[in-house]
Image: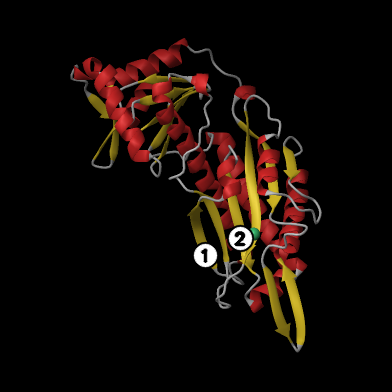
Amino acid sequence: MKRLSRLFNVFIFCALCLSANAQSASFVPLMEGANQLGAQLFWDSLSGIGVLEKNGHSIQFKAEDQIALFDYRTFEIVDAPKIVNGSVFVSNNFLTRMEDFFDSSKPITQDSLFKIGAILIDPGHGGKDSGAVGKHTVNGKVMQIYEKDVVLKVAEDLYRRLKTSYSDKKIHMTRTDDTFLSLEERVEIANNTPLGEHEAILYISIHANSAFDKKASGFEVWYLSPGYRRTILSEDAADKEILPILNSMLEEEFTTESILIAKFILDGMNAEIGKESANRGLKEEEWFVVRNANMPSVLIEIGFVSNQKEALLLTDDKYLHKIASGIYNGLVSFITHFEQSRGFTSGQ
Ligand SMILES: [Zn+2]
């Protein structure tokens, strides 16, 4: 899909922008351009996406891509920023357009900046669906551990902490007891959470792992695969010909945010339980729940119920409390970061 949108890009370049680009545009380093504009630059080298901000207004753009997104609302075709020897360069035409936009836009107040409006915690499984089941014989006694139970405990703990710290945000859970919910129902709850005009929602799915290999153990955090593309923009949002490109751009934005949340949560968990459990790192996958929720989202695997040592840890409320603390601390770091930079890492 990525390759497809590149081809599309070339097509638009040929059809629409040849004359504009033929004028030998001179290029300056992006950082220098940002200084000229008096704008703040956020650059994410992982996705190649940058944001320029001034007076509360923003322009989002992507290296080697001719689409720029103004105030997360309108799109324009601009000179594609170029990457030369690992550095980003923008043309003078590009800078002139950015300058016009910032000059003609009224300053925005603090209230209209994007904020995390809601966090939806999704404990996996429930009811007739136990999720992973661990069966172990400890000191001659058989013990059983169900994924649906341990993830609910962690989710409840996390919910209480977030509710206390963020009275201004909506904190929700997909289930609060041992109820069965289909994946479609979970996605529906996520997509139907009401949000204010400048609010984003985070989706945090909590699961426990199981493997045939009884030695497998540890925790991991999954985020949406960048290879997957959703249709986020409605049909009337823009010219149909460029919709695939625009969609891929917004998708990249959500992916970047999902990777950042995943990273912060993993670090938070590592600080709490890293000595007792193995850190299996960040993972990338097309989870159903995650990919159908139109929001930055992650899926956390808190440990293996199939591993005896870890199963024992997961039946200890103190250990589950540490897991919840780790996730909570990761989320707090992400929210602080997001609300300061709208999800983009600064510098370059
Ligand atoms: Zn699960």
Image quarter hosting the C terminus:
top left
Identify which residue, 176 or 42, lies in the foreground.
176
Q: Is residue 167 above or below residue 283?
A: above
Q: Residue furthest bottom?
A: 140
Identify which residue, 18 or 83, lies in the foreground.
18
Image quadrant where residue 324 sits: bottom right
Residue position for label 1: 280
- For disc 1, the neighbor class at 10 Å (few under 14, some 14 to 19, many from 20) is some
Q: Mark 2 is on which residue type?
A: Glu
Do the CB atoms of the residues marked 2 and 1 lie less than 8 Å apart? yes
Q: Mark 1 is on which residue type?
A: Arg
Chosen colour scheme: secondary structure
Residue 148 visible at all: yes
- For disc 2, the neighbor class at 10 Å (few under 14, some 14 to 19, many from 20) is some
Residue at 71 percent of width and 40 percent of height? 189
Residue at 64 percent of width and 37 percent of height? 201
Q: Earlier in the sequence, mark 2 or mark 1?
A: 1
Q: Quadrant of ligand 1?
A: bottom right
Identify which residue, 86 or 231, lies in the foreground.
231
Label 2 C-beta lies within 8 Å of the nearest ligand 1 atom: yes
* Picture disc at residue 301: 2
Query: Relative to residue 44, is residue 323 drawn left or right?
Result: right
Point out residue 103 in the picture as x, y percentages from the top left corner. 44, 12
